[in-house]
Structure formats: structure tokens, C-alpha cells
Amino acid sequence: MPLHSLYLGVGNIQGLRPFNLREQYGFRFLYPTNPVFTSATLSVIFYMAWSQMGRKTFVLLWAITFAIAAVQRLGNIFKDNFPSYDLYWMVVCILSILTVSFGTQGHVQRVGANVSKPLL
């Protein structure tokens, strides 16, 4: 199933069929299911939560995590603009690793686990 499809129903319900946003409306960069839009929105939400509700470090880490994810997904969208495929691949892979690392560090801080730094 293509990621850009939106289903109106679940299963094989009569009259409800999938439709393709690209076919009906053309490609829209900020349609609601776009991962860049979602990651950027979550980054702003977590940053606002961090600034308004106690400035906990793990919330700021999650805001940074979603900002990195948005940049990584923008890199995937604009991969043809990179000078070489190798550079594109290195950049998006490094950003992906950073996303997992920051998200994990935020989770570890949130639950208060005692994990040694070399593991992260």
C-alpha cells in the first residue's frame, strides 16, 4: 500500500474505497499525513511544553529528536539535490541515528533509569 494513500474505511465495506491524494489533488507538501509536517509539529509541541511546563531535559531532547527527524525526512524528499548519492545516504543515515539516540536518551531520563553512557 502506498504511503500517500488515505483510506476512508477499514476492510471491505461497500461504498468505502481508498482514494489517492496525489491523483485527486496533486502533490501537496503539507498535507496532514506528511511525515515532515508531523515531525515539525511534534517538535514545536514538545518545545512549547518544555518552555511552559518546568523545563525538563527529556522534553527538550524529544523536541530536538522530532526536529532532527523533520530535517532527515526533508533530506529524503530532496535527495536529488545532493551533489552525490553517497553524501545523501551518509547525511540521512547520520540523522536517523541521531533521532534514535536522542529519543532513547530522553526516554532513559524520563523513566529515571540508571544506564551507563557508553551504551548510548
Image (cartoon, rainbow, N blue to C red):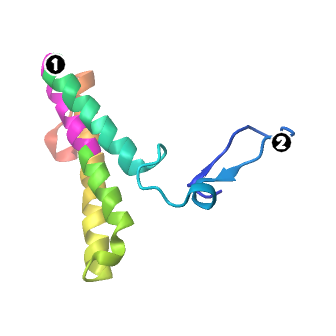
Residue in view at x 77 percent, y 46 percent:
17
| Location of mark 1 (residue) | 52
Give neighbour class at mark 2: few <14, some 14-19, many 20+ (Cα, 10 Å). Answer: few
What residue is shown with label 2? Answer: 12
Say which quadrant the N terminus sits in: bottom right
> Which badge, 1 or 2, is on the more N-terminal residue?
2
What's the magenta region? 54-66
Left or right of 101? Residue 28 is right
User: Residue type at mark 1?
Assistant: Gln
Q: Nearer the viewer, residue 47 or 107?
A: 47
Q: CA distance from mark 1 to mark 2?
A: 46 Å
Task: Say whether residue 113 is visible.
Answer: no
Whether 32 is drawn above or below 75: the answer is: above
Q: Nearer the viewer, residue 17 or 107?
A: 17
The quadrant holding residue 53 is: top left
Q: Provide residue 78's location: percent of width, then percent of height.
A: 34, 69
Residue 13 percent location from the top left of the image = 83, 38
Q: Quadrant of residue 92?
A: bottom left
- Kindly identify the residue that appears in the image at 20 percent across and 31 percent down: 47
Residue 66's disc is: none
